[in-house]
Amino acid sequence: MDRRIEQKNLDVVYGGETYQIYDLGDLLRQPVSHGIDETQVPLLMSKTGDQRAAVRVDTVMGSREIVVKSVGPQVSSVPGIFGATIMGDGSAALILEVGSLL
């Protein structure tokens, strides 16, 4: 993956469609640190209308059913925040709206 980024090859074909590759850390304007010799990296594939994105994430924790709760006006005004949910262990998790981050 890092070699693809260095070569400016920032897309991947999946299911016959081309997805632009983004790094979640870059989208959130946070420092990005990945392993040095990664041969496989997790990508979150997102398709909204004509927009396709493959977002590089640190890890995939699995699939879960969640209930999306709205957030207060202070948080809802932050670009990219869709809502929040309470996880099984009681912790809160923000739900991102990937399309608005691109």
Image (cartoon, rainbow, N blue to C red):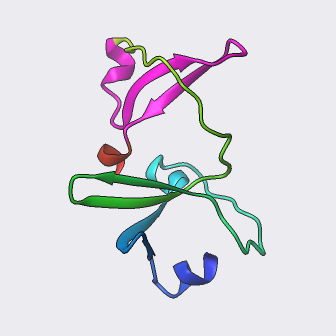
34 vs 5, left or right, is: right
Q: Looking at this view, is 88 or 4 the one in front? A: 88
Query: Which residue does the image show at 47% across and 21% down from the upper left?
Result: 84
**At which x and y percent is residue 8?**
46, 83
> Which quarter of the figure has residue 16?
bottom left
38 vs 22, left or right, is: right
Q: Is residue 84 above or below residue 36?
A: above
Q: Is residue 37 magenta?
A: no
The furthest residue to the bottom: 7
Q: Is residue 78 magenta?
A: yes
**At which x and y percent is residue 50?**
21, 59
Range covered by the magenta-colored residues: 73-97
The furthest residue to the front: 15
Q: Is residue 4 above or below residue 35?
A: below
In this figure, what is the number of numbered marks? 0
Query: Which residue does the image show at 31% across and 14% down from the upper left?
Result: 73
Q: Is residue 65 above or below residue 96?
A: above
> Which quarter of the figure has residue 38?
bottom right
Query: Which residue does the image show at 66% across and 64% down from the upper left?
Result: 41
Q: Quadrant of the N terminus?
A: bottom right
Q: Looking at this view, is 60 or 70 the one in front? A: 60
**At which x and y percent is residue 85?**
52, 18
Q: Quadrant of the C terminus?
A: bottom left
**At which x and y percent is residue 96?**
43, 36
